[in-house]
Amino acid sequence: MQRFWGWLRRERGTQSGFPAMLRVRDASGTLVSRVELSGVFHPSGRRMSKTQITAAGLCLVHWPRDADRLTLEVAAGAGSARLEVEQQRPEPSRVIEVQLEQ
């Protein structure tokens, strides 16, 4: 069934890039329960901004099919981090560890 849905998405042109999974910790190393995400997908310039409740620090960023890179700001409490995520990263299914700074 999953193959069918994957095929249908590809045929309809809605296939997106592999999502980015982030594990976010505050400056002391504690997993955060809620994050603010804001960023820009390149080269389209499409902006994204959302507040997300995490599952043990994990959150997911869906990837639009026209993007090859994301400049992302992650914030929780008094901490924040800025990072760039490539769509063509070596291990796209691997969780990206994010340590916030005060």
Image (cartoon, rainbow, N blue to C red):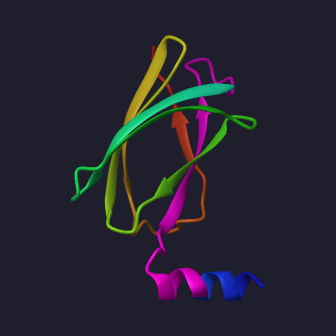
Magenta-span inclusion, residue 15: yes
Residue at the image point whose x is 48% and y is 83% from the top: 12
Does any portion of residue 72 appear in the rendered image? no
Magenta-span inclusion, residue 29: yes
Task: Give the x, y percent position of residue 1.
Answer: 78, 85
Residue at the image point whose x is 41% and y is 62% from the top: 64
Q: What is the span of residues highlighted in magenta in the rendered image? A: 8-31
User: Which residue lies most toward the right here?
Assistant: 1
Image quadrant where one finds the C terminus: top left
Depicted 51 relative to depicted 13: above or below? above
Determine whether, in the image, residue 70 is placed left or right of residue 12.
left
Residue at the image point whose x is 55% and y is 80% from the top: 9
Q: Closest to the observer: 63 or 96?
A: 63
Task: Give the x, y percent position of residue 2.
Answer: 73, 81
Determine whether, in the image, residue 29 is placed left or right of residue 19.
right
Q: Quadrant of residue 94?
A: bottom right
Does any portion of residue 52 appear in the rendered image? yes
User: Which residue lies most toward the front here?
Assistant: 12
Q: How many marks?
A: 0
Determine whether, in the image, residue 35 is placed left or right of residue 58.
left
Residue at the image point whose x is 69% and y is 88% from the top: 4
